[in-house]
Amino acid sequence: MRAMVIDDSRAMRMILKRIVAKLNFEAIEAGDGQEALDLLSTMTEVPELALIDWNMPNMNGLEFVTKVRAEPRLREMTLVMVTTESEQSQIVRALAAGAHEYVIKPFTEGAMIEKLALLGLVPTGANS
């Protein structure tokens, strides 16, 4: 399985890559939503998961979610917002745009694995 980690912070991409690697995901990185869309356009197989920051240059996470949901080829991808945006209205906007889950930074590795497990993306026994 593959996961796309989309965040303008290299440190955050490394943290998220380490977590998904423990769950046997191959991680692909992008520094913003536009770079992620460009990468997706070159891929024959769409990643099962995208972990998306909200606040990024060029194309923010909400715009990325909206564009992915408008693209039939990408609709099966599970989208999780991973962001410091903690206002209820922001969470509602992200979910309404098509995100499946919402994780507020800072988060623990366990909390992230729990969210992915709720989405059916953690193999049995992987989070022990």
Image (cartoon, rainbow, N blue to C red):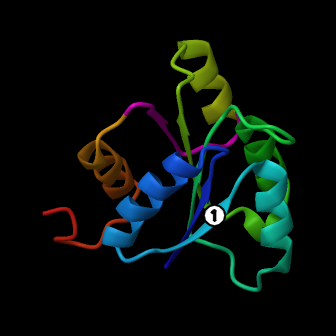
In the rendered image, the quadrant that contains the C terminus is bottom left
Residue located beneath label 1 in the image: 29
**Residue 127 included in the magenta stretch of the image:** no
State the residue in front, 97 or 56: 56
> In screen coordinates, is 28 left or right of 33?
left
Q: Is residue 81 visible?
A: yes
Q: Is residue 120 visible?
A: no
Seen in the image, is 2 located left or right of residue 128? right
Most extreme residue toward the bottom is 44
Q: Residue at x 76, y 86 (%)?
A: 44
Q: Residue at x 21, y 72 (%)?
A: 124
Tally of numbered discs:
1
Query: Could you say where residue 61 lies in the image, as x and y percent from the top left?
Result: 71, 40
* Res. 95 image quadrant: top right
Q: Is residue 113 above or below residue 66?
A: below
Looking at the picture, does residue 45 appear above or below residue 14? below
Q: Which one is in front, 96 or 10?
A: 10
Magenta-tinted stretch:
97-106
Query: Amino acid under label 1?
Result: Glu
- The image shows residue 119 at horizontal and vertical percentages of 41, 55
- Picture residue at 87% right of the left edge, 41% below the top: 58
Q: Is residue 114 above or below residue 36?
A: above
Report which quarter residue 46 is drawn in: bottom right
In the rendered structure, does residue 103 fall within the stretch colored magenta?
yes
